[in-house]
Amino acid sequence: MTSPDDYEPLQENPQLPETINAPKVSIVHELWLLSAGVLATFLLLAVMVWLSLGWLAQFIPLSWEDRLIQPVAQSWQTDATEQAQLQQRIDQLLVRSEYSDLSVQVHILSSSELNAFATLGGQIFVTEGLLSALESEVGLDFVLLHELAHLVHRDPIRAAASQLGVRLLTALAIGQSDLGAPTAWLQSTELLLSRHYSREQEIRADDFAFTMLQRVYGDVEGYDEFFVTLLEQGDTDRFPAFLSTHPHTQYRLDRLRQRLD
């Protein structure tokens, strides 16, 4: 029989350090890391959507573009007589080029701004202000051929598809259940005026216009009238070239002048 003295005395539980369950990193820091990870993932997805849809959009039939944009384009009122003359001009340029099978419609916008742009469905818009400022046929043709280049390279539909993809991705990210707003953008005037082309696309369109002028006229004297007019009227670029999505006017002019050297 064992006696009480035979048992070892009970030992007290050791005192645990107070910081044993405390995180080494603060909760705020962890939340910041989580937020940064989510944001980085979203930005990566946005870039992937932008690039992939922009590439795939070039395979969309032109007839689809035309059906998409016609309801919006028809709402713009232009001078019928002057528009017919401008349409005849672009038609002649198309015939004398290798793109005679491309359907292009020209519209004149009632605006004093010096501007022209191409959009979906083979639509080209030129402002009254630009038409008044350009005095030579070659200067006007360079502008028309520049916009034609965007249509040939499918820049409008590629830009629209990329922007739509990012809009839908953003709507999903913020939990927007009704995706009608991003998709309704496809039928909006904003889409018609959406012409966010990259510097590379603008440079490529300049080179296209210059080459086509040489092919049509042989002599390209007067091609630079649009750029010179912009600079004379105080067209100054607000941002450095590396921050701008659009190449600076002076840079574009200098590039084309080097082709004559």
Image (spheres, rainbow, N blue to C red):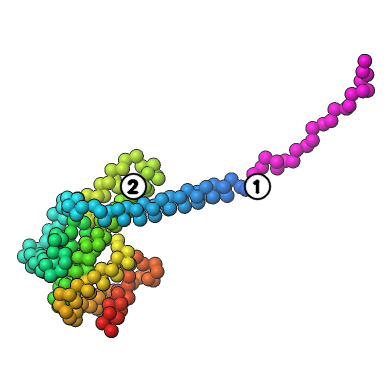
N-term-proximal mark, 1 vs 2: 1
Residue wearing tag 1: 24
Of all residues shown, which one is farthest toward the top? 1
- Residue type pointed to by label 1: Lys
Is residue 69 visible to the viewer in this orientation of the structure?
no
Location of residue 228 (image quadrant): bottom left
Asked if residue 6 is among those painted magenta in the image, a careful observer would answer yes
Q: Position of residue 207 (x, y in %)?
A: 26, 72
- 72 and 201: which one is in front? 201
- 130 and 119: which one is in front? 119
Location of residue 175 (image quadrant): top left
Write the residue at 66% across / 42% down.
22
Question: Considering the image in quadrants, where does the C terminus appear?
Answer: bottom left
Residue wearing tag 2: 168
Element type where label 1 sits in the image? loop
Write the residue at 36% across / 46% down.
171
Q: Position of residue 160 (x, y in %)?
A: 28, 55
First to last magenta residue range: 1-23
Q: Are marks 1 and 2 in contact (CB under 8 Å)?
A: no
Q: Magenta: predominant secondary structure element? A: loop
Q: Mark 1, residues whose alpha carbon is within 10 Å: few (<14), some, or many (≥20)? A: few
